[in-house]
């Protein structure tokens, strides 16, 4: 069953000189998660932040930290991100040899575990780990950079995954990330997504605009 729509602003689009203030601002504006994009310049062609930044931000918000690891290998860093304050840790099947083992590792640290599917990654990549995941992230752009355009084929993937999640009977978040704006948000929600990652669409216009931005993404 599709859950209520939640908004997870990606701090990749925030003002990095004022990250603590930005995180506080999106919480005040009604965000549900804080989405943290971690990139290693190897698995994806960009370099962003590490566990020390997550740790530094943790005291600035009570919201769940939704940490998306676009790094390889993943396993050596799970404990660090868990200790830093991540609540949800999401990885890509291609980022390590044993997806199920890594999901178990995340759970062993008391965290929720997610799997991210790139545009070319088939939905059946999660078929045998549905009992171990708390979140499935559909990438509607190729990972690595913010500000890209939504890939329409992601909508069909969302629909298929919505049906599989509903069949499982588990409350698994179905998240979509990439090119989310007012229009693509509506399409993603209609397809079955219930968590929207939005960077540019959230952080445009300064802190005074964040509440309105989030409300429109949610469909209000």
Image: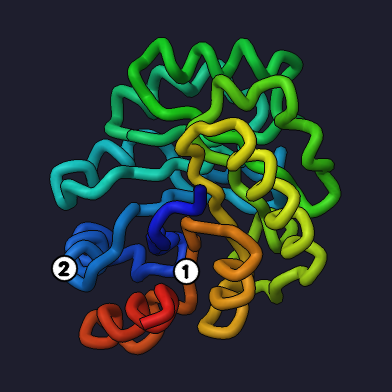
Can residue 8 be seen in the rendering of this structure?
yes
Q: Residue 28 carries which label?
A: 2
Left or right, residue 30 beside residue 2: left
Can residue 11 be seen in the rendering of this structure?
no
Towards the viewer: 40 or 218: 218
Left or right, residue 158 beside residue 176: right
Q: In this view, does 134 lie above or below 80?
A: below
Towards the viewer: 176 or 36: 176
The residue drawn where x is 54% and y is 79% is 181
Which quarter of the figure has residue 22? bottom left
Pointer 1 local density, CA inside 10 Å: few below 14, some 14–19, many at least 20: many
Towards the viewer: 150 or 127: 127
Q: Distance between the residues labelled 2 and 1?
A: 16 Å
Q: Nearer the viewer, mark 2 or mark 1?
A: 2
Local SS, label 2? helix
Q: In this view, does 5 lie above or below 52?
A: below
First in sequence: mark 2 or mark 1?
2
Q: How many labels does the image show?
A: 2
The residue drawn where x is 35% and y is 76% is 214
Which quarter of the figure has residue 140? bottom right
The residue drawn where x is 18% and y is 62% is 24
Check contact, mark 2 vs mark 1: CB within 8 A.
no
Instruction: Please name the residue that numbered disc 1 is placed on.
Output: 199
Please identify the quadrant where the C terminus is shown: bottom left
Residue 124 spot, x, y in % from top left: 80, 34
Local SS, label 1? loop
Q: In this view, does 163 lie above or below 96?
A: below
Residue 156 spot, x, y in % from top left: 78, 60
Residue 143 spot, x, y in % from top left: 68, 54
């Amino acid at each position: 069953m599709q859950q209520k729509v939640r908004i997870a602003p990606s701090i990749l689009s925030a003002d990095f000189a004022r990250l603590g203030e930005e995180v506080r601002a999106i919480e005040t504006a009604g965000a549900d998660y804080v989405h943290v994009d971690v990139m290693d310049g190897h698995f994806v062609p960009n370099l962003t932040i590490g566990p020390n930044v997550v740790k530094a931000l943790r005291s600035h918000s009570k919201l769940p930290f939704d940490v998306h690891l676009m790094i390889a290998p993943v396993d050596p860093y799970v404990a660090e991100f868990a200790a830093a304050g991540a609540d949800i840790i999401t990885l890509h099947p291609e980022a390590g040899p044993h997806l199920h083992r890594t999901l178990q590792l995340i759970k062993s640290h008391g965290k929720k575990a997610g799997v991210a599917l790139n545009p070319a990654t088939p939905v059946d990549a999660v078929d045998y780990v549905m009992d171990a995941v708390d979140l499935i992230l559909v990438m509607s752009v190729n990972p690595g950079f913010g500000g890209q355009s939504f890939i329409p084929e992601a909508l069909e993937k969302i629909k298929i995954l919505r049906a599989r999640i509903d069949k499982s009977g588990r409350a698994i978040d179905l998240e979509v990330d990439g090119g989310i704006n007012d229009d693509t948000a509506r399409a993603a929600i209609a397809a079955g997504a219930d968590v929207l990652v939005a960077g540019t669409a959230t952080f445009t216009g300064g802190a005074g605009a964040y509440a309105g931005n989030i409300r429109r993404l949610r469909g209000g």
